[in-house]
Amino acid sequence: MQRRTGHVLVVDDDALNRRLLTATLAREGIRTTTVNDGSEALTAIKEDQPDVVLLDVEMPGVDGFEVLERIKADEATRHLPVIMISGLDDTDSVVRCLEIGADDFLPKPFDAAILRARVNAGLDRKALHDLEAERVRDIFSRFLPEPMVDEVLARSNGDARIQPELLNATVLFGDLRGFTGFAEGRPVEEVIEAINTYLTLMTDAVLDAGGTLVDYMGDGIMAAFGAPVPSEDHADLAIAAARAMAGEQLATFNAWLTATVGVEERIRMGIGIHSGPVVSGSVGSPRRLEYAVIGDTTNTASRIESMTKELEHAVLFSAQTRDALREAPGDAVSLGPVEIRGRSAAVELWALDVEEPA
């Protein structure tokens, strides 16, 4: 049989049983921790979480039933495989444990082959769980700020899908100006490298400001603030990201273009921001899921971004965003009500003219 590695917590009030279990597992190269009652087991799990728990049913004080219930009730430990230790004639206890959530049971007296098989099966389940958890973490890390990943994982209970939720948030759209002219006649590899460099800089600005990267659209970018995790300062975060994008990050991109491909003419960008209710959650099919922020707020933010071409301001944001700000920017300029395509009523806009640092 293939040797496995892992960590098993052995919980049994009988010292002889503990020695027999640990000796058998040690021959398989499996690390063990032993405790003799339920209270110690719960403490041991918190201090050094095992891969599998071997848990005796009958113990003084906190018995195996209660330990099992507490393991399976805690989101941090419910995934742990628990193998209950029970007598062959104790059918009622076995059934009760399985109903609570036990993964398997080990009959007394122990058979070494059965012990190895059931512990190895538990280690396999734990390894698969860890691989899936790492996959989901990797998915979330692609579009969420690192401090937000753990919170979203806890809210989704390890599921790659973010459940739909109605939130008040701020949506940001950013797009390059003049990039089409730059791309014409250039090698494909050069164009893709330029887009990737630009998107990397803009993504850093969004994530560093606490925003969520929602989508790339060619040389455009969409971000949300206050979704999927609500925040009271979502509008302030969006304005901070916009300043970084249209300022330092755009300057870095233009410097890269000059140094790498010899482009002297500076590329500009436009950013549109709007705040309001959005539907936040995962959309798509079982074969492909994506995070989305949907609603009129998103549509309006996109249309505001398109107005930067006509109004010749780097950053435009709505009155709704200004009202949501905790601290209104002193350099913001009111443009008054502006007619926007696709909307029956004019939208009151404000502008920021962000200068690239020299």
Image: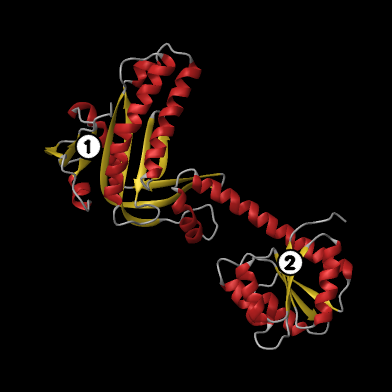
Tell me which residue sits at (64%, 65%) in the image. 49
- Is residue 300 in view? no
**Is 155 on the left or on the right of 77, as rendered?**
left
**Is 225 on the left or on the right of 126, as rendered?**
left
Tell me which residue sits at (40%, 29%) in the image. 198
Position in image of residue 102 (x %, y %): 69, 72
Position in image of residue 125 (x %, y %): 70, 59
Which residue extends farthest front?
A: 358
Residue type indicated by callout 1:
Leu
Establish if 95 lies above or below 163.
below
Tell me which residue sits at (88%, 69%) in the image. 112
Q: Earlier in the sequence, mark 1 or mark 2?
A: 2
| Other-residue count near label 2 (Cα within 10 Å), few / some / many at <14 / 14–19 / ≥20 | many
Q: Quadrant of residue 121?
A: bottom right
Position in image of residue 116 (x %, y %): 83, 65
Task: Give the distance between the C-alpha atoms of the residues marked 1 and 2, in whole angstroms.
Answer: 58 Å
Q: In front here: 24 or 219?
A: 24
| Residue to which mark 2 is pinned | 8
* Local SS, label 2: strand
User: Which label belongs to residue 316?
Assistant: 1
Quadrant location, the N terminus: bottom right
Residue type indicated by callout 2:
Val
Position in image of residue 258 (x %, y %): 38, 17
* Local SS, label 1: strand
Establish if 83 lies above or below 332.
below
